[in-house]
Image (cartoon, rainbow, N blue to C red):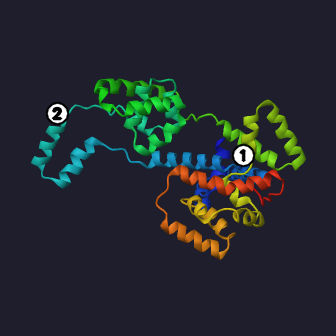
Amino acid sequence: MTGRQKAAMLLMSLDAATTVELLKGLEAEEIQEIAVELARIDAAQQPDTKEQAKVAQEFFNSLRRRRTPQFSMKSFLNQTLLSIVDKDKAEQIKSQIGKTPKKKDAFMDIRLANPDELVLALEGEHPQTIAVILSELDPGKSQEVLPLLSKEAQLKAVCRMTNPDLVGAEVKQRMASMISERLKGFKGETLAEKPEQTLRKLAIVLSGLERELRDQLLDEIKEHDEQTSTMVRHLMVTWEDILSIADRSMQEALRTVEAGTLALALYGADNEIVQKIRSNISERVAAALDEEASLMQEPLEKEVFDAREEVVSPLRAVNEEGKLRFIGR
């Protein structure tokens, strides 16, 4: 995207007051160009929320890089230390620091890279190298990177992470240098769209067609690839679609779901989805739901996923019949 397109997409995700503050520093012609781009996106009536999130993250990262003050060791030694300790002690500390070998953290660039860049840089690497890199990342980032690797790489790398002491410090340094060098070639790169993301787009397109034409096209897909046809049908209605399903359709579907399943499905869910479901169940079911939630221990991620699939299942069945009503996606 061009800078103008990114600016327009960013402004669409901000409140009016923040938008005004950002636009204050621009020339009138620039504001006009962004306004035209905003009108174009608005006319499409379906802004890409994922793309908006990526643009917002890029903007945030840009701000963070510019605002982070550059640390100066010289300034620290000559000013900060003297304001904390006396001159003799400061000189002693400076002398001790002077004897410390100046060695850059070999993993610094790796820790700063985004997950997509890391996955691209690790592609085709030996499992031991992948294990070392994952071990040096903070747990949160490792958790993001690991699922993006191939299944084979995941399994082999995790097995080697159980024996981190087998790799010496010098070997780790060489691995870090090699991956850091590879990262330079992937700066700003993102992973290709996953097949399920493409199929999800197709599923939404097909779900907007008349049932007869939709089923005809799905049967055509099935002749070539039955598994793909099944997945497309599955992706026509997902947990995230609950907000765009008409209340009447929601009420009928939720009658078949037990309170315990609902409590599991709503664990950690977006507040909007929670409110949508609660507004479409009876007071009796709501009371049972609250009771189940109060007795529930922290569930596993898979348990929550399976419960949400149970909630969505009757909605998919109604959609197969061509009777599911959407109020907009």
Q: Nearer the viewer, residue 84 or 276?
A: 276
Q: Which residue is mark 1?
A: 234
Q: Residue at x 73, y 66 (%)?
A: 251
Amino acid type of the residue tagged 2 in the rendering:
Lys
* Residue 226 image position (x, y, % from top left): 76, 35
Disc 2, SS? loop
Q: Position of residue 27 (x, y in %)?
A: 64, 52
Query: Which quadrant of the rendered structure holds the N terminus?
Result: top right
Q: Residues within 10 Å of mark 1 (few under 14, many from 20)?
A: some
For badge 1, the amino acid type reads His
Q: Is residue 40 above or below residue 180?
A: below
Q: Is residue 63 visible?
A: yes
Residue 206 occupies quadrant: top right
The C terminus, quarter of image: bottom right
* Residue drawn at (54%, 60%) of the image: 267
Asked which secondary structure carries label 1, the reply is helix
Q: Earlier in the sequence, mark 2 or mark 1?
A: 2
